[in-house]
Image (cartoon, rainbow, N blue to C red):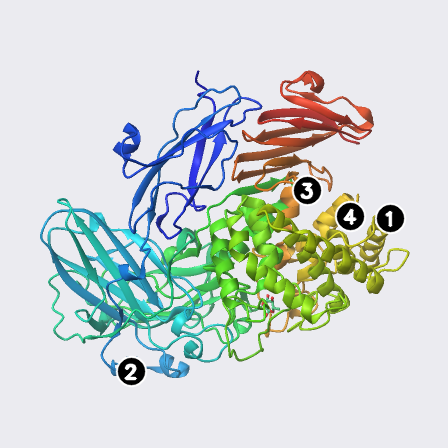
């Protein structure tokens, strides 16, 4: 019997598609399911893993055969075959059985490959340019460099030639840097990662990347070439007005190893050692915040190919491997994923051209230019314009974000920087020879390449713009770590921003691997007494403000982020891995606050950061609420991994009691009667049942008191619309959504926002720009309303009792004047969709539910109207069970499949 209908698709290993170079010794395998039939389930599976495609197809020499396992499981199946060695390439597939016992065909094969698992597998050491300090080399000169005057150094170029005597069967390059690197073989760039190896606390953990370079090698002479940048390791980081030497190091170093396997099975390695040569070249300096300065006249054609005359080059310094763990990059890495064409170019001053990219974006620009050798073209990047059309750069603080290109004088020259990144909507070009055409500048969008997973769209252009702004904010700020902003001298992994946005992020893109990586950073930064930090990776000794530990709603990211990843992706390993860190945090809070009100060891207590009413919401109230929330989440995570969670459940109840005694009145008023106070109390389940409705009423009154506007800051904003909707006030939530006056999302959009602003009043008619001291136009925190768009407006949600969308809830909330709304989401179990439209009182809802899941569906049925599916009364529809018919809606249970419902809404 076959069940050709049920198909395993989207095979993933460690959350990724065909990952190369992983160091999980028992990799987890997952698949989603697709089928055209209704109510499909998986009753069993069988995974096969082999060392190559042929063996897999023939089912010979298998590394692992799971056997037929009777189970509906499709997530996180641990590889259970023989131990995998460094570099082992594994090809696998899965077949599944449906509810009737029919077998599917095997899936398309997928691949994963092990990285360098043992430290002893690394043969070389860390190499750096020259023998002495980097200052040995010719320093850049000129006004531009002098103005920086802080030791920015030219980028080292490193090379080595080697011969290969036989034809190559396979070759892998493992590479990393203290700093940033770009590597090439025989003149061809290796891979498409940028800003590798990414940011970690380099004193605790350094990521390496793995590349398949088989096709780049040839029999005979070959050459490896690398360019290094300062990056987070040695460049400007955060608001430190000097180079980051104080944080990690001062001169970049490369560690790389090329492992070659010949056709005859013999192997050979070429590693970073004393045989490499070094020089400087056209990159005068390249810094994440300062930008890049490139003199094309200094290019060295052929430097990364064999046969290049490198007699004038220096040797290299070699440092031993050291004992900082080298780990395989667990996520997708950073890449340039898209190009943005300039929309317009203006000339606000003679010779100053300003390109409008039509979108606030993050990355850099590719410049196309023709002119005389020695001509310097300068590009400055900004998010906004002054009234006279010149670029507004004050809000960048000390981040220079300027790239300079000096022409070599060829026909057409094309330039892109390597080791920098800018946040910008406008590019100012000066020194361009002649009139620059519109395509002289092309925007390159750079971010952690988390795969898109969801989309939301509705009938309101403003709301669609909001969704777009959220997604652009996510792309721009997920750059190896979740940052607060991409433009000014900050760009740090602020934990509060990450926790409030993570759920929204997980709907827009597959962030499972990205946050798994960042949680390692979070644990690296945790202080010995258990406190999670304000920023991750932790930056110590950082100028402007004194970063702290333990801040409410910031440190709590150490609980909320892994919980969200567990819930969204069904990933229990992230919970297991960080469970001790989480319990240390819980003890830290408890020891400091034995009376169960969180008033001690708060670090910098930011409160409801950037709320239009300042610190009106008592900070200790927020702190205590978050602690209770942590307790509840840890209890749930404990159960998920089979640990005792009861202690945390009672802790939750006890904090809840203390919270009520301290902040809640008998008529349901919370704290200082602010919106955020009610929002957290309701969202976190802190009120006795009988006071919930009252408190929700007070929340609505508090909104009315602001003339039906929100007054939430970073902390309250994410849960505001969900809480209103859950409490029976979707109309109020929609009112906030549709507002176009200050403060609202619509106000920022009316004023030209194409990303989420840091502050509700980033720019106002009355006052113009907010203080340049802190005014980013690309911060995602206030975009945490995004989850409400998916989960409530479109109604695509997960049953809170399950993880990984095992049970789905489809519950659209038509309203707000929307004629239609739609969300699609590639969950770990397969594609989910919910699309509704209203015409008159006719309500249509089309949904997709993936196999092996079930859904509860709420269909509006005003006045007890009947519901139909596929043209039939729902009672007779295949695969639909009516759970309840209520006065205004029907509650249905369905299995997988596509369904078309028609119900009725009030006119
Ligand atoms: C600002 C950051 C960040 C916020 C902290 C408290 O400097 O931009 O968004 O989390 O302050």
Question: Going by the image, does 882 lie left or right of 156?
Answer: right
Ligand 1 shows up in which quadrant of the image? Answer: bottom right
Could you say which disc has been placed on residue 690 in the image? Answer: 1
Judge whether 70 appears above or below 290 on screen: above
For label 3, the SS is helix
Residue 899 screen position, x and y as percent:
61, 25
Dots 1 and 3: beta carbons under 8 Å? no
Judge whether 139 appears above or below 348 on screen: below
Identify which residue is drawn at 62% across, 47% down: 639
Q: Nearer the viewer, residue 424 or 541?
A: 541
Label 4 belongs to which residue? 732
Residue 218 in sight from this viewpoint = yes
Could you say which disc has been placed on residue 664 in the image? Answer: none
Q: Nearer the viewer, mark 1 or mark 4?
A: 1
Identify the image quadrant of residue 742: bottom right
Measure how far apart labels 1 and 4 are at the Cα level: 22 Å
Q: In which quarter of the image is the C terminus?
A: top right
Measure how far apart labels 4 and 2 are at the Cα level: 62 Å
Dots 3 and 4: beta carbons under 8 Å? no
Label 3 belongs to which residue? 792
């Amino acid at each position: 019997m076959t069940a050709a209908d049920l198909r395993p698709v989207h095979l993933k290993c460690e959350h990724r598609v065909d990952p190369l170079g992983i160091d999980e010794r028992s990799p987890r395998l997952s698949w989603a399911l697709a089928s055209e039939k209704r109510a499909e389930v998986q009753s069993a599976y069988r995974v096969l893993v082999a060392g190559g495609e042929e063996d897999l197809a023939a089912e010979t020499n298998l590394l692992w055969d799971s056997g037929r396992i009777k189970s509906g499981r499709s997530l996180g199946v641990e590889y259970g075959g023989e131990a995998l060695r460094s570099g082992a390439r594994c090809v696998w597939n899965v077949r599944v059985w449906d509810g009737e016992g029919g077998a599917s065909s095997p899936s398309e094969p997928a691949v994963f490959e092990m990285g360098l698992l043992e430290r002893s597998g690394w043969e070389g050491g860390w190499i750096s340019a020259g023998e002495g300090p980097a200052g040995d080399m010719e320093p850049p000169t000129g006004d531009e460099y002098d103005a920086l005057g802080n030791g920015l150094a030219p980028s080292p170029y490193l090379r080595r030639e080697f011969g290969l005597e036989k034809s190559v069967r396979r070759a892998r390059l493992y590479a990393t840097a203290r700093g940033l690197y770009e590597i090439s073989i025989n003149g061809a760039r290796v891979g498409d990662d940028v800003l590798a190896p990414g940011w970690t606390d380099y004193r605790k953990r350094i990521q390496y990347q793995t590349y398949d370079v088989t096709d780049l090698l040839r029999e005979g002479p070959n050459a490896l070439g690398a360019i290094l940048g300062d990056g987070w390791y040695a460049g400007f980081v955060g608001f430190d007005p000097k180079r980051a030497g104080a944080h990690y190091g001062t001169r970049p170093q490369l560690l790389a190893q090329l492992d070659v396997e010949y056709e005859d099975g013999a192997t050979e390695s070429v590693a970073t050692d004393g045989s490499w040569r070094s020089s400087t070249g056209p990159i005068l300096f390249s810094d994440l915040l300062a930008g890049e300065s490139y003199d094309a006249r200094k290019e060295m054609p052929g430097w990364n190919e064999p046969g290049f005359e490198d007699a004038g080059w220096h040797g290299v310094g070699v440092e031993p491997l050291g004992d900082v763990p080298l780990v395989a990059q667990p996520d997708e890495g950073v890449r340039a994923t898209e190009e943005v064409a300039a929309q317009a170019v203006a000339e606000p001053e003679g010779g100053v051209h300003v390109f409008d990219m039509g979108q606030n974006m993050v990355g850099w620009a590719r410049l196309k230019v023709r002119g005389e050798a020695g001509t310097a073209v300068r590009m400055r990047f900004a998010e906004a314009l002054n009234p006279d059309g010149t670029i507004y750069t004050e809000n960048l603080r000390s981040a220079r974000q300027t790239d300079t290109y000096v022409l070599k004088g060829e026909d057409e020259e094309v330039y892109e920087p390597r080791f920098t990144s800018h946040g910008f909507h406008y590019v100012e070009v000066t020194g361009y020879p002649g009139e620059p055409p519109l395509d002289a500048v092309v925007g390159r969008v750079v971010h952690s390449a988390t795969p898109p997973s969801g989309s939301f769209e509705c009938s309101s252009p403003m709301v669609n713009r909001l969704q777009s702004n959220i997604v652009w904010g996510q792309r721009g700020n997920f750059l190896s770590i979740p940052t607060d902003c991409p433009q000014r001298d900050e760009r740090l992994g602020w934990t509060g921003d990450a926790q409030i946005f993570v759920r929204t992020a997980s709907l827009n893109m597959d962030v499972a691997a990205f946050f798994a990586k960042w949680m390692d950073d979070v644990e690296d930064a945790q202080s010995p007494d258990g406190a999670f930090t304000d920023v991750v990776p932790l930056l110590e000794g950082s100028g402007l403000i004194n970063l702290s530990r333990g801040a409410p709603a910031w440190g709590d990211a150490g609980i909320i982020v892994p919980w969200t990843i567990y819930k969204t992706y069904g990933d229990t390993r992230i919970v297991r891995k960080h469970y001790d860190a989480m319990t240390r945090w819980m003890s830290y809070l408890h020891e400091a606050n034995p009376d169960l009100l969180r008033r001690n060891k708060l670090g910098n207590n930011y409160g409801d950061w950037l709320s239009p009413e300042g610190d009106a919401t008592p900070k200790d109230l927020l702190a205590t609420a978050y602690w209770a929330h942590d307790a509840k989440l840890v209890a749930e995570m404990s159960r998920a991994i089979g640990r005792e969670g009861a202690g945390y459940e009672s802790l939750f109840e006890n904090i809840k009691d203390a919270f009520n005694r301290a902040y809640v009145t008998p008529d349901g008023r919370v704290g200082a009667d602010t919106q955020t106070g009610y929002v957290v109390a309701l969202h976190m389940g802190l009120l006795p049942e009988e006071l919930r409705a009252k408190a929700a009423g007070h929340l609505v009154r508090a909104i009315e008191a602001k003339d039906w506007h929100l007054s939430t800051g970073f902390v309250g904003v994410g849960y505001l619309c969900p809480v209103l909707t859950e409490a029976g006030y979707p109309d109020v939530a929609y009112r906030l959504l549709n507002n176009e006056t200050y403060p609202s999302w619509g106000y920022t959009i009316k004023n030209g926002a194409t990303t989420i602003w840091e502050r509700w009043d980033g720019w106002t008619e009355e006052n113009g720009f907010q203080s340049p001291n802190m005014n980013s136009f690309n911060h995602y925190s206030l975009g945490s309303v995004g989850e409400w768009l998916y989960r409530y407006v479109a109604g695509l949600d997960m049953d809170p009792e399950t993880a990984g969308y095992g049970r789905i809830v489809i519950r659209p909330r038509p309203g707000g004047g929307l004629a239609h709304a739609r969300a699609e989401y590639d969950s770990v179990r397969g594609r989910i969709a919910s699309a509704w439209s209203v015409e008159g009182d006719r309500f249509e809802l089309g949904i997709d539910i993936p196999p092996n899941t079930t859904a509860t569906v709420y269909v509006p049925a005003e006045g007890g109207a009947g519901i139909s599916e596929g043209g039939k009364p729902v009672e007779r529809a295949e695969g639909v069970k009516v759970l309840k018919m209520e006065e205004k809606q029907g509650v249905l249970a369905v299995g997988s499949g596509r369904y078309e419902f028609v119900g009725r809404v009030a006119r």
